[in-house]
Amino acid sequence: MRVGVIGCGYWGAKHLRVLTQIPEVSLVVAIDARPDQLSQIQQMYPGALCASSLDDVYDLIDAAVVATPPRTHGPIARELLKNGKHVLVEKPMTASVAEALELIELAEKNNLTLMAGHTFAYNAAVTALKDLVDSGELGSVYYLDSARLNLGLYQPDVNVVWDLAPHDISIMNTVLGAEPTAVTAWGSRHAGGPFEDVAYLRLEYGTLGTTANLHVSWLDPCKVRRTTVVGSKRMAVYNDLLDDGRLRIYDKGVQALPANDGAMPMSYRYGGIVSPHIAFTEPLMNEDRHFVECVLTGARPRTDGYAGLAVVRVLEAAQESLATGKTVDLLEVSKA
């Protein structure tokens, strides 16, 4: 199998590194219009073929990873699918719901693999967190909370929601096994740029009676990558910045007792903390191996086009909510 990587910047270079280690990939083609970038890639991965234009290598590849700026994802993936190539598109899969639907239709029509690059869905800690929820060990899920904060990196073409929130939306959808039914967003521009650099999202999973709160920021002194799930029995915290114990389960909780003289006494449970051993393998390696396997076997990707669409649908709703200050009902939008 021969795979092209279109866009050899931060994420594209990571895909090149991983793909060169997968035995089923016989040829990796690095495609980037920047000569300096290609020169660096050639030095780092001498076994990769380098090209400045996708048009020059269509006949040399069977599939491609699209790791270009977000607004170009849809158009590039569309051309690849039209030319019979399997496609993995980095997050967000497209810049609009309409583009995502078009890619899904093209992939299904041409019997091609379309996969969204939601790396955290291939993270062993996120899988373990999902298993905790599915098994009922945490009890009924009251709410989820996530924070993805750092000082930078400011993007030239999208706001912080489109840049960072896809990770957390994908994690929430994966862990809950559901899609949001409503989205509310607040955001601000602080550093003088054209896009929001700090934002808060509230996702309502109406079918589950659960909510999720997301905080994303390019303007924070501390790097944070944390997801908390609060259940009626236990609570769990996934911290991606920890080398050991990325997932911790807290045997803690609160329960209301019968009212006494008008007061509302609460029973607090302070139990132990368990950090289960999780065999960690690189999520991007898991993701790219899965993509190659799906192309070769025809299996449906874990993060297929519909998973990518679900995230883009939330992002588009969040953008509307930022503009209007109103909650966007995704069930009503889907009927429109």
Image (cartoon, rainbow, N blue to C red):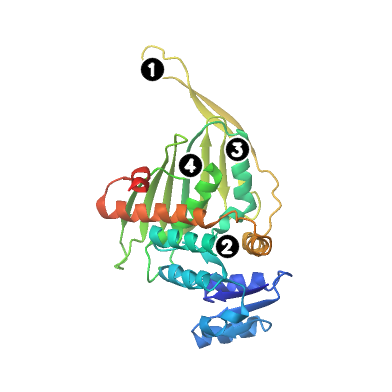
Question: Of label 2 and label 4, which has the lower sequence position?
Answer: 2
- Above or below residue 245? Residue 69 is below
Instruction: Please give the residue where the numbered disc 3 appears in the rendered image.
Output: 134
Residue visible at 53% across and 30% down?
Answer: 232
Q: Look at discs 2 and 1 and give the one toward the viewer.
A: 2
Task: Place residue 26 in its image quadrant.
Answer: bottom right
> Which structural element holds mark 3?
helix
Question: Of label 4 and label 3, which has the lower sequence position?
Answer: 3
Q: Of 251 and 102, which appears nearest the observer?
A: 102
Q: Look at discs 3 and 2 and give the one toward the viewer.
A: 2
> Which structural element holds mark 4?
strand
Instruction: Please give the residue where the numbered disc 1 appears in the rendered image.
Output: 263
Q: CA distance from mark 4 to mark 3?
A: 15 Å
In the rendered image, residue 224, in percent from the top left (x then y), is placed at 50, 55
At label 1, which amino acid type do we have?
Answer: Ala
Q: Look at discs 1 and 3 and give the one toward the viewer.
A: 3
Instruction: Please give the residue where the numbered disc 2 appears in the rendered image.
Output: 111
Q: Residue furthest top?
A: 261
> Which structural element holds mark 1?
loop
Q: Tell me the number on the disc at residue 144.
A: 4
- Above or below residue 65? Residue 311 is above
Callout 3 touching callout 2 (CB < 8 Å): no
Residue 131 visible in rendering: yes
- Above or below residue 194? Residue 101 is above
Q: Quadrant location of the N terminus?
A: bottom right
Q: Look at discs 4 and 3 and give the one toward the viewer.
A: 3
At label 3, which amino acid type do we have?
Answer: Asp
Task: Place residue 65 in its image quadrant.
Answer: bottom right
In the rendered image, residue 329, in percent from the top left (x then y), is placed at 34, 44
